[in-house]
């Protein structure tokens, strides 16, 4: 009997040592000699992490950290969550009986469901999605699965609301797919379990934010080369979208700003320089400003514009410098319109000149007016109609109604 127990004990010890070794080994595989996490994309290309870019591209790096791309996803941190956790403004009530409260306990944040005042469930804020330009939504880990929390922060109303598209009841079971993170992060490793829904993620292999290496490709090789050859002035192992063809350049932005793409391969296969059509069935519907969503289909709308169709060179970068936060700077964007539209070129604006109208200050509100999003819209308590986020129409054309509004506004204020 004693012999049997000893034998069993030895077997159990050996087994646990083996298990421990395997565990330690798999952990080591993702660390380099300095103990840093090593992340490779699905093609085996290694990421360097944007913190390394700072050493040699300080200016771009610092400005980039102020952009919506950079902060479109991150580990949940109260400092960056725009909604309030203070008593009195930390709840969303579905009705008299069902209420969710945003609460802090120790260093964690929770969405706590109360039914008739009785605490029923609490789920932690683990990941924040959205810079907050329009809103922020939150994800919760359950083992290796991610779920969207029921309550979203909606910027236009400056309050907590039911998550867009949710029924009017508390649900915690809406899974997050890799496609969601493909647009809102740089990389997220899923476990290779094809056709299993929802997908499982490796939480140590996520690069938050739409970061340098999303638009330039994994950069470990570039960093190693430039570090070893500090006098080399010409980069060899990194993609600059400006050197791609126009379509490749557009495809990078369209991978996230191109409407409802249906993927035809696994997520995170498309990388900068690729052809989008090899990875997705493209959204070829002709969008109109009234069907503005995926959330945004800026690419589809731009493609339908005369500006784009009659120019050989226009890309998203004709108007956007994605390294900087230029949100709301209408004068700057108007300057960019006037790099093509000038009086000398005889293609300047033909609107009737009226008193007080400074055409050059703001081409945007007349030719790219704000329209209501259908995807980013929420029902606030007691409301019968949804409140929608406002998105710029990228169908650049003549909008008589918006012009009238703008002229009325000018008349009133001059
Ligand atoms: C050790 C210095 C160093 C580091 C670190 C570094 N770079 Fe560079 N990078 C350079 C040099 C030098 C060039 C060539 C000169 C130039 O274009 O500025 C360059 C050029 C580039 C270019 C333009 C390539 C072209 O063909 O025009 C991009 C894009 C780029 N780097 C991105 C990155 C990113 C992203 C990171 C961080 C992941 C990074 N770099 C980290 C030194 C570095
Ligand atoms: C990996 C997906 C992805 C790619 C690639 C991408 N974007 Fe974005 N972009 C987003 C997301 C997500 C947001 C919304 C960020 C937020 O507010 O949370 C965004 C926001 C923006 C904004 C609004 C910025 C603001 O201040 O509100 C602009 C402009 C933009 N993108 C332009 C571009 C251009 C141009 C390219 C190509 C060079 C590009 N994006 C590539 C995902 C992407
Ligand atoms: C095809 C790419 C794509 C997918 C898929 C996608 N998004 Fe977005 N999302 C965007 C873009 C682009 C924006 C910026 C607004 C716009 O252009 O409509 C955005 C905006 C947002 C915003 C508002 C951000 C802000 O700063 O105001 C939230 C929140 C959001 N998305 C959450 C999600 C969630 C959650 C999922 C998955 C369930 C998801 N998105 C799937 C591209 C995408
Ligand atoms: C949303 C996509 C996007 C992100 C994110 C991004 N870039 Fe770029 N980057 C571009 C595009 C597009 C160009 C080419 C612009 C043009 O047309 O000249 C570019 C050009 C560059 C260049 C060439 C020199 C220059 O100034 O044009 C460098 C260097 C560079 N990026 C570094 C970085 C670094 C470092 C980061 C992160 C801190 C970063 N980029 C983040 C899209 C991006
Ligand atoms: C890369 C060059 C380029 C840029 C930048 C550009 N456009 Fe255009 N735009 C064109 C071309 C080419 C046409 C078609 C023929 C023409 O008018 O010259 C056009 C046509 C137009 C039209 C007539 C549309 C119609 O449906 O009749 C308007 C309005 C317009 N642009 C406004 C703008 C505004 C506003 C901006 C900035 C937000 C802008 N454009 C930026 C090249 C450009
Ligand atoms: C002709 C100029 C022009 C071109 C080309 C252009 N944009 Fe924009 N874009 C603008 C202007 C102007 C705004 C409004 C900026 C603001 O008010 O902050 C804007 C806003 C945006 C926003 C912010 C979302 C919102 O509605 O608030 C996104 C995302 C965006 N653009 C993506 C793109 C993408 C992707 C492309 C290429 C397919 C592109 N843009 C091409 C001029 C342009
Ligand atoms: C107050 C609103 C308003 C502003 C501001 C404005 N536009 Fe226009 N624009 C219009 C209207 C309306 C038309 C059509 C006028 C007509 O032909 O009856 C137009 C026509 C145009 C056309 C077509 C010209 C033609 O003959 O085909 C272009 C190009 C254009 N605008 C560019 C611009 C640019 C670039 C700016 C900024 C520098 C600008 N607009 C500012 C309202 C405006």
Image: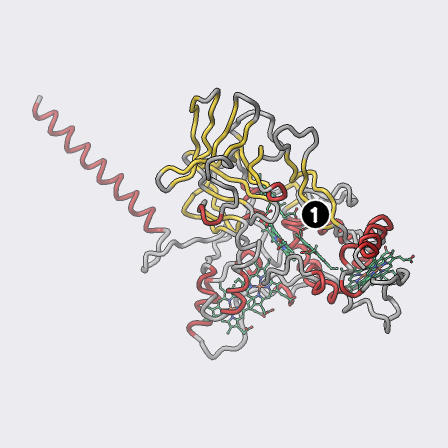
Disc 1 target residue: 391
User: Considering only vertical position in the picture, is 287 above or below 324?
Assistant: above
- Nearer-the-camera pick, 117 or 136: 117
Q: Quadrant of residue 13?
A: top left
* x and y, in percent, of residue 7 in the image: 13, 29
Helix or strand or loop: what does disc 1 sit on? Answer: strand
Q: The N terminus lies in which quarter of the figure?
A: top left
Residue sitting farthest toward the left: 2
Q: Is mark 1 within 8 Å of ligand 6?
A: yes
Residue sitting farthest toward the bottom: 231
Q: The C terminus lies in which quarter of the figure?
A: bottom right
Q: Residue at x 53, y 37 (%)?
A: 176
User: Considering only vertical position in the picture, is 235 above or below 27?
Assistant: below
Q: Quadrant of residue 366?
A: bottom right
Q: Residue at x 83, y 70 (%)?
A: 342
User: Considering only vertical position in the picture, is 249 above or below 86?
Assistant: below
Q: Residue at x 40, y 54 (%)?
A: 38
**How many numbered circles are shown?**
1
* x and y, in percent, of residue 242 in the image: 65, 66
* x and y, in percent, of residue 365 in the image: 77, 54
- Nearer-the-camera pick, 329 or 14: 329
Q: Is residue 405 left or right of residue 126?
A: right
């Amino acid at each position: 009997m004693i012999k049997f127990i000893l034998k069993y004990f030895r077997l159990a010890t050996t087994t646990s040592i083996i298990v421990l070794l395997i565990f330690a080994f798999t952990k080591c595989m993702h660390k380099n000699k300095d103990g840093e996490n090593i992340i490779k994309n699905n093609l085996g290309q290694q990421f360097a992490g944007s913190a390394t870019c700072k050493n040699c591209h300080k200016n771009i790096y610092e400005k980039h950290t102020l952009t919506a791309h950079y902060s479109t996803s991150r580990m949940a941190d109260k400092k960056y969550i725009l909604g309030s956790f203070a008593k009195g403004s930390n709840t969303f009530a579905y009705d008299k009986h069902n209420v969710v409260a945003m609460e802090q306990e120790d260093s964690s944040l929770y969405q706590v469901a109360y039914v008739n005042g009785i605490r029923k469930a609490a789920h932690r804020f683990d990941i924040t999605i959205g810079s907050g330009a329009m809103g922020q939504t939150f994800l919760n880990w359950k083992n290796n699965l991610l779920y969207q929390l029921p309550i979203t922060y909606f910027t236009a109303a400056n309050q907590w609301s039911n998550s867009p598209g949710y029924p009017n009841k508390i649900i915690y079971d809406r899974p997050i797919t890799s496609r969601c993170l493909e647009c809102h992060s740089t990389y997220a490793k899923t476990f290779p379990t094809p056709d299993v829904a929802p997908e499982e993620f490796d939480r140590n292999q996520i690069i938050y934010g739409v970061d340098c290496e999303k638009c330039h490709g994994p950069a470990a090789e570039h960093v190693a080369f430039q570090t070893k050859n500090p006098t080399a002035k010409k980069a060899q192992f990194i993609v600059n979208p400006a050197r791609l063809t126009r379509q490749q350049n557009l495809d990078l932005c369209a991978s996230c700003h191109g409407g409802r793409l249906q993927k035809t391969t696994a997520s995170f296969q498309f990388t900068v320089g690729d052809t989008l059509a090899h990875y997705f069935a493209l959204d070829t519907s002709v969008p109109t400003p009234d069907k503005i969503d995926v959330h945004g289909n800026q690419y589809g709308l731009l493609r339908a514009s005369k500006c784009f169709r009659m120019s050989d060179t226009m890309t998203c970068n004709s108007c956007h410098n994605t390294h900087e936060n230029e949100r709301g700077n209408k004068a700057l964007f108007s300057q960019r319109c006037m790099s093509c539209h000038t009086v000398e070129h005889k293609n300047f604006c033909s609107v009737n000149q009226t008193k007080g109208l400074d055409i050059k200050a703001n081409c945007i509100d007349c030719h790219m007016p704000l329209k209501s999003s259908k995807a980013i819209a929420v029902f606030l308590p007691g409301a019968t109609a949804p409140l929608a986020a406002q998105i710029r129409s990228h169908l650049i054309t003549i909008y008589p109604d918006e012009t009238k509004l703008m002229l009325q506004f000018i008349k009133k204020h001059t």
